[in-house]
Amino acid sequence: MRDNRRARSASRRRTRTTTAIVLLAALALASCTGEQNALDPAGPFAQAPHDLIIPVAIIAAVVFVVVQGLIIYSVVKFRTRKDDDGSLPVQTHGNTRLEIVWTVIPAVILAVIAVPTVQGIFEQMDEPDGDVLTVEVIGHRWWFEFYYPDFDIYTANEMAIPTDTPVRLEMTATDPIRDPEQGVVHSFWVPRLAGKQDLIPGQTTFLNIQADAPGRYIGQCAEYCGLSHANMRARVEAMEPGDFDAWVDAQATPAEVPEDGTFEAQGRELYHDLGDGRQACAQCHQVWEGDGDRQPGTGPDLTHLMSREEFAGAIHDLDEENLRAWLEDPDAMKAMQYEEIGIGMPNLDLSEEELDALVAYMLMLDPDA
């Protein structure tokens, strides 16, 4: 009977151990997906940290194996035996030579790692040479705004860049809803293009990115910034230089103004004035129609809204169904932070007819239409 209990107990321990190993393996594999994988760099500013991480990881693995091996050896070698008389083992305090060895070796390892690490940090922070594209990144609650000062273009959540071109990100954070001077700290991170860099209210931080090949690179805010932190994502669309130039030309054109008397024209009127004292879209969002300079609002620029693939912090596909649901009840589409303001996008209390007209107008905000 006792042997059976022992067997069952051992079986349960093996089952728990196997389950833990499987869960840890699944977690490790989930963290190395192709979409956000720092171990699969796609540009020089991600390649440099990767090239440093690998030897450091190897050194750490060797140290781990040596230390764990010594622990296991000690546990087995000096374990309690049946014939022990209960006395303490021989004490070996004060082995100066051994203490010097295990102090010097870690110090040398850390010094060897520190030199390329510090050098790499400065190289990553320096402004690249040659033809550099500048993009200003503003972290809001909870979305990223991108401004191209060379072209006077605003966009949100999705950043377009040319391949094989260094991009200098000038970054800060703000919270225009609560307090423009306060805000919260965000962190911009696109693992395959560069490391993390914080966005700090009232300060400007810098990050360099570059993509070697066209593609869509997934990023996110990597600093907890409120209840909707997980819903603050970013996309970098790397294009061939010719395609990027075409994108710039399209984004730099004013939004199309619908013809009078059309359903879209009715939606445009609602965009500017909902009536009944309701807050209109134009109070927070910009649709630039060529009249004067482009001026950012407290919400994302909508001039060419439908040229993007995602919206609401890049968590929803930008299509008619999701756009309609967003305008109807934004707080149901994205977790809120403050009960009194939700996510900052108010419920507009639209009638079905107003909703249809406003959606129709926004669907035409596309430079390629």
Image (cartoon, rainbow, N blue to C red):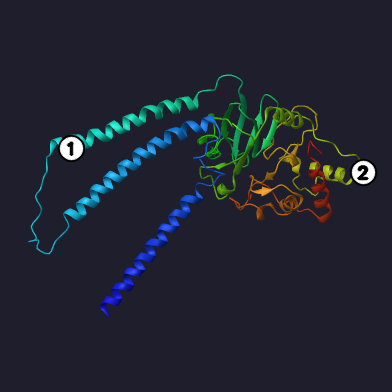
What residue lies at 27% left-to-right and 35% top-to-bottom? 106
With 290 as the anchor, is 94 left or right in this view?
left
Q: Secondary structure at mark 2?
A: loop
Quarter of the image with the C terminus in it? top right
Disc sitting over residue 350 in the figure: none
Q: How many marks?
A: 2
Three-letter amino acid code at the position of disc 2: Gly
| Inter-mark Cα distance, 1 to 2 | 87 Å
Instruction: Name the residue located 66 percent from the left edge and 53 percent from the top edge.
Output: 333
Q: Helix or strand or loop: what does disc 1 sit on? A: helix
Q: What residue is disc 2 on?
A: 261
Q: Position of residue 132 (x, y in %)?
A: 60, 23
The residue positioned farthest toward the bottom in the image shown:
1
Q: Which mark is residue 99?
A: 1
| Residue nearest the observer in this picture, 184 or 121 | 121
> Which residue is drawn at the image coordinates 55% and 42% (left, top)?
221
x then y, percent, for residue 154? 69, 33
